[in-house]
């Protein structure tokens, strides 16, 4: 009786125990320090990653610490991972952008300090606040930051009713800010290929979702392959996660931000099969436009 109760209590903890055991084995073989972060293109040159900025692919980031120098390029998500062998203490060290891209590489923002995220079994992980690179000039759509001139105030005069002024016409809505949610089958249609942004059909799943997905699906499976997934919980998860990732790049108002899609996908792959199915269903609801009490349509029109 007691062993049965203990078994039921321990069963939910098995995935966590397996993860800890795996981490211990990896750390025993190769105890490293890992630095992760992301680079954004500061399109408005306001000095921080904000509303109008996007993850920058192909920027070079360097960490120099204790006489060691490491440099890596950012992936399609603008993120980077820099590994130091032997778990050196990187506290007090900094990461910086050393090279931007042709479109966004005229200047770089300040270096950012490394923060210890966790330390376990001799393996350490550090995170870095977002780094920025800047174009030569702010984009035309950026709000003006100039200070308005000081206007001298004349002496008060008799009050008169100002003439009625009609409101200005509404500004046209930018497609990226329009709410949109499109199911996986829409992303497979050739007439909508122009809506693929940041990533391409041939982008590897390993690049889009990271090393956990690479371990599950292998290094060769592409996002286009992922959209054809069916007949298996993890193939269904990949199909819906891929559609959600594409929707997050296509519409700022999509239910899941890009970071949320990648994070939930990785947590699902590390959890149980039931958890993977639950995440796949949540992505599916978002992809077909179910958002709370409202329905969101797909804003696709055939590409010219």
Image (tube, rainbow, N blue to C red):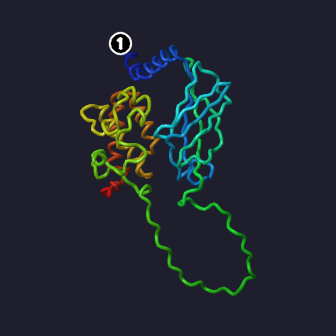
Q: What element carries label 1?
A: loop
Q: Is residue 169 above or below residue 227?
A: below
Q: Where is residue 94 in the image (x, y as percent from the top left)?
A: 65, 33
Q: In this view, does 272 lie to the left or right of 128?
A: left
Task: State how many labels appear.
Answer: 1
**139 or 299: which is nearer to us?**
139
Q: Is residue 90 left or right of residue 15?
A: right
- Circle 1 is placed at which residue position? 1
Q: Which residue is drawn at 57% across and 61% down?
A: 143
Q: In this view, does 192 lie above or below 201?
A: below
**284 or 10: which is nearer to us?**
284
In the rendered image, which quarter is residue 152 located in? bottom right
Q: Within 10 Å of the Cα at label 1, are there few (<14), some (14-19), or many (20+) other Cα atoms?
A: few
Given the current orientation, which residue lies at the most extreme left position?
231
Q: Is residue 128 above or below residue 168?
A: above
Q: Position of residue 88 (x, y in %)?
A: 63, 21
Q: Is residue 210 above or below residue 175?
A: above
Q: Quadrant of the C terminus?
A: bottom left
**134 or 274: which is nearer to us?**
134
Given the current orientation, which residue lies at the most extreme front position?
102
Q: Position of residue 44 (x, y in %)?
A: 58, 54
Q: In which quarter of the image is the N terminus?
A: top left
Q: Which residue is drawn at 65% across and 30% down?
A: 64
Q: Where is residue 151 in the image (x, y as percent from the top left)?
A: 72, 73
**8 or 294: which is nearer to us?**
294
Q: Which residue is drawn at 38% across and 12% down?
A: 3
In the rendered image, which quarter is residue 175 located in? bottom left
């Amino acid at each position: 009786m007691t062993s049965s109760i203990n078994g039921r209590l321990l069963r939910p903890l098995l995935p966590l125990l397996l993860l800890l055991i795996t981490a211990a084995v990896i750390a025993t073989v190769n105890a490293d320090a890992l630095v992760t972060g992301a680079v954004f293109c500061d399109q408005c040159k306001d000095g921080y990653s904000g509303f109008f900025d996007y993850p920058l692919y192909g920027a070079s980031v360097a960490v120099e610490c204790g006489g060691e120098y490491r440099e890596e390029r950012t992936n399609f998500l603008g993120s980077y991972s820099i590994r130091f062998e032997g778990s050196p203490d990187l506290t007090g060290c900094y990461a910086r952008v050393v090279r931007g891209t042709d479109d966004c590489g005229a200047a770089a923002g300040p270096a950012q300090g490394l923060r210890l995220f966790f330390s376990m079994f001799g393996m350490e992980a550090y995170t870095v606040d977002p780094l920025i690179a800047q174009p030569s000039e702010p984009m035309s759509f950026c709000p003006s930051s100039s200070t308005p001139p000081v206007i001298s105030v004349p002496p008060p005069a008799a009050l008169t009713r100002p003439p009625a002024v009609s409101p200005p016409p509404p500004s046209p809505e930018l497609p990226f800010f329009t709410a949109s949610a499109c199911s996986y089958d829409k992303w497979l249609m050739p007439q909508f290929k122009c809506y693929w942004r940041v990533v391409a059909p041939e982008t590897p799943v390993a690049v889009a979702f990271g090393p956990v997905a690479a371990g599950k699906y292998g290094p060769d499976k592409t996002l286009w392959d992922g959209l054809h997934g069916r007949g298996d919980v993890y193939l269904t998860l990949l199909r819906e996660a891929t559609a959600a990732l594409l929707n997050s790049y296509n519409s700022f108002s999509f239910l899941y931000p890009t970071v949320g899609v990648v994070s939930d996908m990785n947590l699902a792959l590390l959890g149980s099969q039931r958890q993977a199915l639950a995440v796949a269903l949540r992505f599916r609801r978002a992809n077909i436009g179910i958002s709370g009490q409202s329905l969101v349509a797909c804003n696709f029109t055939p590409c010219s």
